Amino acid sequence: MAQYNDTTAFYDDVAEDYHLWYRDWDAELDREGLNLRRFFRDREVKTILDASCGPGTQAIALARLGYTVTAADPSPGILARARENAAQYGVADRITFVQSDFQSLLRNVEGPFDVVLTKGNSIPHLLLDEQIEESLLIFNELLRPGGLLLIGMRDFEPLLEDRPRFWPGRVHDGPDEQVITFDIWDWNDGPPVTVTFNHFIVRGDGTTYKASRHPVVFRALTAAEVEVVMLEVGFENIQSHHDRWELLITATKPA
């Protein structure tokens, strides 16, 4: 197994089409902001590090609510799209964008932050135990005492037995073309167990359609595996919450 799972090419390739995985990206921004804010109650949150910002779904949503956000991602293509989106929504002045993966954050951002978050199933891109531990140690170091860590990821636990191959996406009916997204999953026994998501984008009209495939690898992580590492690196008050397809795991750095 490769020691490092380089996802940059994948996210560069899909940067312009990332919104197609949502039914309505504008509605998703509103929902994400309100959903995240409920975890920040009574915590005096002002500064947030979004450690895997993608096209800015969480960073923009939080900046619109008045938070000061640092948004990091290793993909230059998707960072460019995030900057465009931030300008479009009028919050470019509230977000500092940084090109960085998890392991390079200490060299590229300056803490401490009130909240460190990573959503969008980014933690499962880390294939090895030591990479997960290193990243959580870095998140811990970047948090102020009493700060909140929030991880959003797919919970692979209920999928490991049946190992589905097909995962439906979205159908977007535009004035000039129809766009359809779906995934084909290829499982690998490992260890650890990994799954390649082959993201398909199909475009066309009438009888003529064209498909493109964009593969990216995830470790089939479970909540229990992540929670154990959180405890080992010193986090406390660990809780799991289910939100649609995503599992949200929260923890605090000791005050």
Image (cartoon, rainbow, N blue to C red):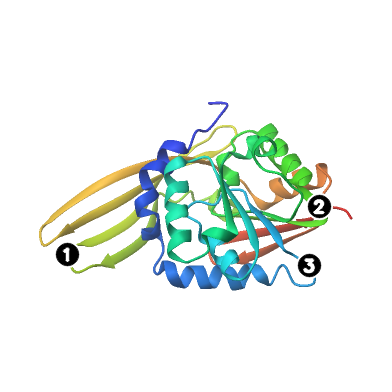
Mark 3 or 2 closer to N-term? 3
Provide the residue designation for mark 1.
176
Q: Which of the numbered marks, if any, corresponds to residue 44? A: 3
Q: Secondary structure at mark 2?
A: strand
| Residue type highlighted by circle 2 | Arg
Residue 140: percent from the left, percent from the top?
Answer: 77, 46
Residue 161: percent from the left, percent from the top?
Answer: 54, 49
Residue 1: percent from the left, percent from the top?
Answer: 54, 26
Residue 85: percent from the left, percent from the top?
Answer: 44, 59
Q: Are marks 1 and 2 in contact (CB under 8 Å)?
A: no
How packed mark 1 is, by other alpha carbons closer than 10 Å (few <14, some 14-19, many 20 or more), is few
Q: Quadrant of residue 124?
A: top right
| Image vertical order of residue 96 relative to residue 89, above or below | above
Provide the residue designation for mark 2.
144
Is 24 on the left-hand or right-hand side of 218? left
Asked if residue 154 shows in the view, the reply is: no
3D distance between C-alphas at marks 1 and 2: 50 Å
Q: Secondary structure at mark 3?
A: loop
| Residue positioned 80% across, 72% down in the render | 42
Q: Quadrant of residue 73?
A: top right
| Residue positioned 70% across, 38% down in the render | 106
- Between 40 and 66, the one nearer to me in the picture: 66
Q: Residue furthest left?
A: 207
Is 236 on the left-hand or right-hand side of 106? right
| Residue type highlighted by circle 1 | Asp
Q: Residue furthest top?
A: 2
3D distance between C-alphas at marks 3 and 2: 12 Å
Which mark lies nearer to you, 1 or 2?
A: 2
Q: Which of the numbered marks, if any, corresponds to residue 232? A: none
| Residue positioned 81% across, 52% down in the render | 144
